[in-house]
Image (cartoon, coloured by chain):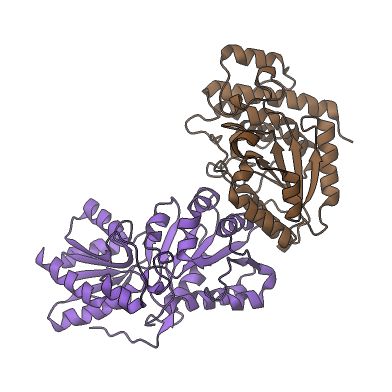
Chain colours: A brown, B purple
């Protein structure tokens, strides 16, 4: 059973890490990062079998690929708090000579990152390849991914979605962060994608919907359901309904905080809403 | 003069296909991906022998490049196969982010490069791919000249860790390099020593350069011929050593003069030893339909053209 209190504490600390990283360099993407805090905390601390000593090949480990690389602040915080690299390194986010580049990369050798992402729409193809490599290696672990909902406007996703179903890539669980927002406004306003569930199902995927994507118990239950559905000839999609900016009241639910850093006052307000539980970096 | 014998015209893409077949038997980590051009890329044998290691992705090159990157995670050595146009321009950002910037050990194998694809015309005749690929940090760029060399290069790149662009073509051309010869990435091959002019060629134009050297020899001009199969990293020492002897150079390639081998050579010479240079290459133009021979003649990419440029550059010394 999950220790929800422990995970809740971790989420609070991760939210602090997110806003502090972004504030320190007055750049980065807090909105989507905050919205995915519970998901990534649950994934790395409850769901995946993984080894923070980090080996690129990740044999006999579950692997995660972040496709919407701009939410690097939450990814870096969760990796650091899971022991992949020193938590103190979060202070180097987006600074010259850092391993914590604006968007995640393997190029600087940051443990925990297996692919560069940031230019959108590429992560699912990479994940499909990694899933096929696992099958060739007789490795029964699972590939997890995260994508933005707006990111699905990139056509490459649909090439990968078609392939994964046709070739029965069933060791793959792809999660879509359905926060309904993108840079220019709501996804419905910018480019209405209709029913994502209908689209994935029409392509031959099984879909699990997590309505409360900022609730740890709901996330864990939904992911366990997805795992139970995997390895049955079809890839699995999780539609994770989150709130952009969740956990910081003035950032919640708006695309305005997609790529804007809080000022000093806003930082204090954000931190006041998310108590320090594991000590700040 | 050394003489080179054409042992019979063969297509370079078959050199790739046969190399891949051999790799399939030798190296269990080699996997292959193809975007609906298995026959054109001569990947059928590999597919037949190793169906579990062959990934037919359909007409979806972007997904193919991403999948190839992913397959390296777990230790596979992926070889992607499609036409040069769809191997580069169509998927530039996928290669840039998921392969080159991510340091993935992917071998991008590209057939039907250049004008000699022929009748299909400009939509398929990419003349910009060497430039696109050589600009990517960490990318090795190879353009082989005949069947034997393409097969040797295919085998060699499997043992080289890092992303590689291997460019070859469609038509049957002279096969003259040694059978089962060694292939050293980044090492120029001296084909013919000479003293009056250096001819540096890549791909299908290497044979044309040898033919040009014969013609020049009949006119009493001693041409040195160097096969540059690896455009990046460029064997700068071989080029500089040669021009210090000859004092002038002609570069020849089936590619735009912008971004190709000629430009890499020009940069090297400008930096280390400024030297008169002439370019046998397309002049910032798209191709068109025609037979390979007609196209090479119209766009000045043959032995005749190399001879003309050699005489011109000698006059500039």
Q: Vertical placement of A178 versus B50: above or below?
A: above
* Residue B100 coordinates in the image, percent (x, y): 50, 51
* Residue B202 coordinates in the image, percent (x, y): 34, 69
Residue beneath the point at 35% across and 74% down: B204
Q: Vertical placement of B118 versus A90: above or below?
A: below
* Residue A159 coordinates in the image, percent (x, y): 63, 55
Quarter of the image where the N terminus of chain B is located: bottom left
> Does residue A77 appear left or right of residue A22 in this picture?
right
In this rendering, the count of numbered labels is 0
Residue A278 visible from this viewpoint: yes
Residue A88 visible from this viewpoint: no
Residue beneath the point at 59% across and 40% down: A110
> Does residue A58 appear left or right of residue B131 in this picture?
right
Seen from the viewer's position, the closer of residues B193 and B10 is: B10
Quarter of the image where the C terminus of chain B is located: bottom left
> Does residue B215 appear left or right of residue B282 in this picture?
left
* Residue B172 coordinates in the image, percent (x, y): 41, 81
Q: Vertical placement of A183 versus B315: above or below?
A: above
């Amino acid at each position: 059973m999950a220790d929800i209190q422990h995970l809740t504490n971790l989420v609070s600390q991760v939210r602090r890490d997110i806003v502090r990283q972004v504030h320190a360099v007055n750049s980065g993407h807090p909105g989507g990062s905050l919205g995915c805090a519970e998901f990534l905390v649950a994934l790395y601390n409850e769901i995946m079998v993984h080894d923070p000593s980090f080996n690129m090949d990740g044999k006999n480990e579950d692997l995660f690929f972040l496709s919407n690389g701009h939410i690097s602040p939450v990814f870096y915080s969760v990796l650091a708090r899971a022991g992949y690299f020193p938590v103190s390194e979060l202070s180097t986010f987006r600074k010259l000579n850092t391993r914590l580049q604006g968007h995640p990369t393997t190029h600087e050798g940051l443990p925990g990152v297996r692919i560069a992402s940031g230019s959108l729409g590429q992560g699912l193809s990479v994940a499909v390849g990694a899933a096929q490599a696992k099958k060739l290696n007789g490795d029964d672990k699972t590939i997890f991914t995260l994508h933005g909902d707006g990111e699905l406007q990139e056509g490459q996703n649909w090439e990968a979605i078609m392939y994964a179903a046709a070739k029965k890539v069933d060791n793959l669980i792809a999660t879509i962060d359905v926060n309904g927002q993108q840079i220019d406004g709501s996804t419905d306003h910018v480019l209405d994608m209709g029913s994502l569930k209908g689209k994935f199902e029409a392509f031959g995927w099984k879909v699990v919907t997590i309505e409360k994507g900022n609730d740890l118990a709901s996330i864990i239950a939904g992911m366990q359901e997805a795992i139970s559905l995997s390895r049955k000839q079809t890839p699995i999609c999780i539609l994770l309904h989150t709130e952009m900016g969740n956990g910081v009241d003035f950032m919640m639910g708006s695309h305005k905080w997609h790529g804007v850093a809080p000022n000093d006052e806003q930082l204090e307000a954000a931190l006041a809403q998310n108590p320090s539980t594991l000590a700040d970096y | 003069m050394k003489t080179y014998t054409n042992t019979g015209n063969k297509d370079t893409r078959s050199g790739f296909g046969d190399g891949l077949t051999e790799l399939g038997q030798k190296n269990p980590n080699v996997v292959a991906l193809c975007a609906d051009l298995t026959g054109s890329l001569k990947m059928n044998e590999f597919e037949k022998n190793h169906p579990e290691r062959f990934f037919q992705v359909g007409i979806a090159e972007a997904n193919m490049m991403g999948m190839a990157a992913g397959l390296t995670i777990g230790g596979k050595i992926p070889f992607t196969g499609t036409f040069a146009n769809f191997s580069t321009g169509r998927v530039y950002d996928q290669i840039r982010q998921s392969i080159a910037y991510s340091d993935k050990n992917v071998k991008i194998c590209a057939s039907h490069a250049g004008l000699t694809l022929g009748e299909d015309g400009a939509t398929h005749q990419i003349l910009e791919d060497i430039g696109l690929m050589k600009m990517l940090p960490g990318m090795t760029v190879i353009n082989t000249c005949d069947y034997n060399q393409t097969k040797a290069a295919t085998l060699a790149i499997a043992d080289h860790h890092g992303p590689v662009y291997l460019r070859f073509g469609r038509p049957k051309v002279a096969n003259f390099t040694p059978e089962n010869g060694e292939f050293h990435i980044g090492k120029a091959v001296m084909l013919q020593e000479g003293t009056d002019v250096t001819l540096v060629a890549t791909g299908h134009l290497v044979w044309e350069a040898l033919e040009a050297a014969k013609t020049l020899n009949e006119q009493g001009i001693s041409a040195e011929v160097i096969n540059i199969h690896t455009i990046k990293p460029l064997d700068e020492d071989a080029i500089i050593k040669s021009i210090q002897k000859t004092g002038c150079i002609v570069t020849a390639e089936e590619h735009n003069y912008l971004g190709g081998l000629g430009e890499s050579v020009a940069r090297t010479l400008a930096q280390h030893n400024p030297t008169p240079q002439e370019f046998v290459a397309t002049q910032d133009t798209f191709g068109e339909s025609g037979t390979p021979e007609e196209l090479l003649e119209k766009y000045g990419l043959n032995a005749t053209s190399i001879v003309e440029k050699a005489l011109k550059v000698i006059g500039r010394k």
